[in-house]
Each structure stands twice: as structure tokens, then as C-alpha cells.
Image: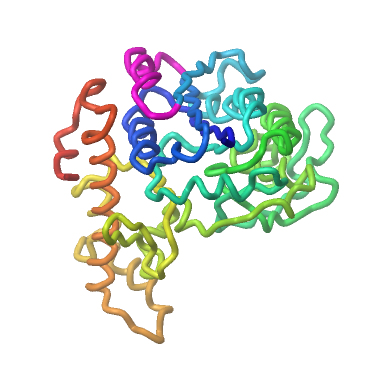
Amino acid sequence: MAKYAIFAAATENYLPYINAQLNSIEKRKLYEKCDLTYYLMHHDNFNRKYLQDVESGFSFNVVPVEIMRGDINLPNTTKRIEYIKRCRYKKMVPLAMECDVACFLDGDMFCVSDQFINLFDLVNKSYYMIGCNEKYKWDVGNSYFYNHTKNPLLDKPTKLMQFICNTPAIFDMKKWQEVFEAYEDIAINGRQYKNGNPDNIMGIGDIMCWNIAIQQQNRNNDIITFPMETMAQVHYTNMRQWTCPVVEKDYWRSMSGDRIYIIHGRVASWSEEGFMKKHINLETDEGDAEKMQNKYKTIKALKPSLTKIESNIKKGLVAIQKEWYDLNFNHSIKLSNYTDIQPEWENFK
């Protein structure tokens, strides 16, 4: 059987999302046709009982791996979220080298398709990486440079047309190690002039470090991008007519019919009075109605009813909340054993 591995990194506050992710792997039986190991890279006093319980709580191997300050050469003042984002790249390299295919996930993702594991099969024994297409295509010129040499990060100014999200990424580490090493170098030593201003020097964001490293190592042509709505449901794809999620008998697809593999987002904050009211309700006085009108006014051929669109989108968001609740409270490891339950989560049932 092929040896596959999934990697995710998290701090204590991400426990509800990590738990949903682990239970989603179990629910979708991603382990059935492979030798699957899940590496939970944790940082900053993650719940120890939880770490012990998940090691034996699933039908696949779960290995906790602690990220410590000092594991990567970043200043002590580096913010916790930035530190763990950058350190996870270095921490996973030696572990991923031991498997046929590695999958890199964010902590707040969960799987909604048993077909997700098929993507591992697609890249097995190949040089390709499957990634999630980001809508942004950034120009990287001389304003991105190495701090110690002032040399540009790229040989010539380039638009990153193959710009992808950090996660999910599915690949063979033995064929992508040099990109991970380039990422680490850029994350530590790379700088940029903010807005092109030489008097304002700052670090480079995580996703830019990743894509610059891919470009720098000439691996763009080895990237296979899947649409954002199939791999993340972010950047408002979950709120657009043709990309919002639809669930039929546990088959997750976009409104246009594409299979959805992954849901990405901190669902626990999507309460009726929070996320939905802010983004969906056309009757609010916060300017949302105008935004929604502008968003859909270009669809002239069908001229869809805004009321109908709102209803479909809300159904998709409710399905996401319901799935997150189900994963956390109705499967192998129950969230209620490890953290306080917020009253609004009961509305997700």
C-alpha cells in the first residue's frame, strides 16, 4: 500500500478545527486504500489530553509533533501565528521524506469527499503538485530582495500567474524539498519595500514566500491548480451564485456542479448574528444590499433573483456549519471532552 501523510499545524485555539479535520478523515475513510499517517504539528501548550487521545482514537495513525521556539531561525519577537506558519514548512520536511505523498493542510480545513484521497494517487510517483488556485496574480520585482545582500529574490520581475494557496498542497517531498528549503530561506532573509517605498522595509507574507519559492526554483509548470471553490470555499466563493456549496445526500458540489473536496474557514465564528448577518442579509443597514447588487449585476443573461440567490447561499453556509458540528460532536473524538462549548454552536445542528 502507498504511504501517504497529512500534515497540519495548530495552536490551542484551533482545537475545534483540528478535531473536525481529524474526524472528517475518519468519516470519509481516507485511510482505507493506503497507509495513512496524520502529523499534528502543535505549538504553545496544546491540550495534552487531546494529544494523547487522538494517538489511538482513529483508524489511521496520528503522530503529535511539537513545534518549539528555536526550531526555525526567526527573531524571538515573531508573532505566534507567523512563527507556526513558517516553522511548519521546516518541521514537516524530514517526516514527509519518508512517505510517497504528503498533503499539507491548514488547521481549519475539513474534508467533505471520500474522493480527496484520489488526488494523492494522481501525484504519486510524479513531479507534480496539486494546489488551490488563488485569485490574486502578484507582480514580484526588485522591491522583493534578500536583506543581507539586497539582491532581488527573482532574476527578473515576474507576474506569478500560477499563484496558489499554501494549502491544500499534495506532492512528493522527495521531489519538492528544494522549494521548501527556498521557502525557509525567503521567510527568514527575504524583505520587501512596502508599496515600493525604500524607506519602509518589512518582511514577506507567508503565501508570498511560498509562491516566490516555487517561481525561484522553476517549478511553476509542475503545479496543477484546482478551482478555489473545490478546494477551499474562501474569498466569497461560498457566497456566489455558481460557486456556493450544495449538498445532496452527502455529495458536496458547487452550484455549477464541481465536486467540493475541502471546506476552509473558522466555522465556529459563523454564528447567525455574526458571519451570516454581516455577509448575507440583504435587509441590513450596513451597505450589504448594495454590495450584493454590485456583485451580481454582471450576470445579465440570467438576471437571477437576489432573494433566491440569498436563499441558496444561506443553505450552503448552513450545511457547512452543520457538517462542522457533526464532525465535532457525533464522531470518534468529541470536542466536548476537551473545551467549553459555545451556546451558539447548538444552532449548527
Horizontal relation, residue 72 to residue 285: left or right: right
Question: Which image quadrant for residue 296?
Answer: bottom left
Quadrant location of the N terminus in the rendered image = top right
Report x, y in % for residue 191: 70, 35
Task: Identify the residue at image location x=78%, y=40%.
Answer: 153
Q: Which one is nearer the viewer's eye here, 259 or 297?
A: 259
Report x, y in % for residue 158: 76, 54
Report x, y in % for residue 99: 62, 30
Report x, y in % for residue 187: 67, 31
Quadrant location of the C terminus in the rendered image = top left
**Res 190 visible:** no
Task: Identify the residue at image location x=28%, y=38%.
Answer: 327
Task: Identify the residue at image location x=44%, y=39%.
Answer: 32
The stretch drawn in magenta includes residue 161: no
Magenta segment? 43-60
Question: Which image quadrant for residue 92?
Answer: top right
Q: Which one is nearer the viewer's eye here, 132 or 272?
A: 132
The stretch drawn in magenta includes residue 53: yes
Horizontal relation, residue 175 to residue 241: left or right: right
Task: Identify the residue at image location x=69%, y=54%.
Answer: 160
Count the marks: 0
